[in-house]
Image (cartoon, rainbow, N blue to C red):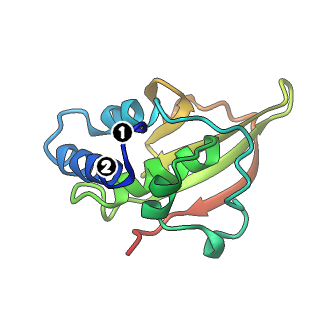
Amino acid sequence: MFTLEVEDRLSAWSDLRKHLDLSNDPLQDVVTFWSDIPFTPHNHNIDPYYQESWPTPWEIIADNRYDDFTRAIMIGYTLLLTEQYKNSDVQIKTLIDTEFKRLYNVVYVDDTWALNYDDNKVVSANNIPTLYRLENLIGLKRPR
């Protein structure tokens, strides 16, 4: 998907959202879709602390540069733009593992599921270590 032209990427993303409403495992399907992004470490195009400055999800797909935070945004927006998850509480929590000096941008869905913690699977929110320090909390809204 990420090697396609812009219009084709946008169509593929639209197809994914339609598929999620019919899927038996929509959260895992979202994780799988966004696991193959063209990863750009430290993509400074998005300031995680100033949501009003963020590009739209369509602009993010057009730009086609993703870091861990951008992937979290797109996971959340993908879910919010489906019928099944349009009213869900979707949050991005930036968590710091101070022991191993690691940062996670975890997408919480209804405080039950955590995505973008493990690149390949959905985990229960209860399985996220409580020792991590909360650096930032963003409640995502359905984009227009």
The image position of residue 141, as x and y in percent, is 46, 69
Q: Residues within 10 Å of mark 2 (few under 14, many from 20)?
A: some
Q: Secondary structure at mark 1?
A: helix
The residue at the far front in this view is 5
For marks 2 and 1, the one nearer the N-term is 2
Q: Which residue is mark 1?
A: 30
Q: CA distance from mark 2 to mark 1?
A: 10 Å
Q: Is residue 98 left or right of residue 126?
A: right
Q: Is residue 114 left or right of residue 105?
A: left
Callout 1 amino acid: Val
77 or 6, nearer to the observer: 6
Considering the image in quadrants, where does the C terminus appear? bottom left
Indicate whether 91 appears above or below 98.
below
The image position of residue 36, as x and y in percent, is 46, 30
Residue at figure coordinates x 42%, y 52% from the top left = 110
**Is residue 125 in sight in this rendering?**
no
Q: Secondary structure at mark 2?
A: helix
Callout 2 amino acid: Trp
The image position of residue 27, as x and y in percent, is 34, 38
Residue at figure coordinates x 45%, y 53% from the top left = 76
> Viewer-nearest of labels 2 and 1?
2
Q: Quadrant of residue 101?
A: top right
| Residue 105 numbered tag | none
Q: Which residue is mark 2?
A: 13
Q: Is residue 131 left or right of residue 99?
A: left
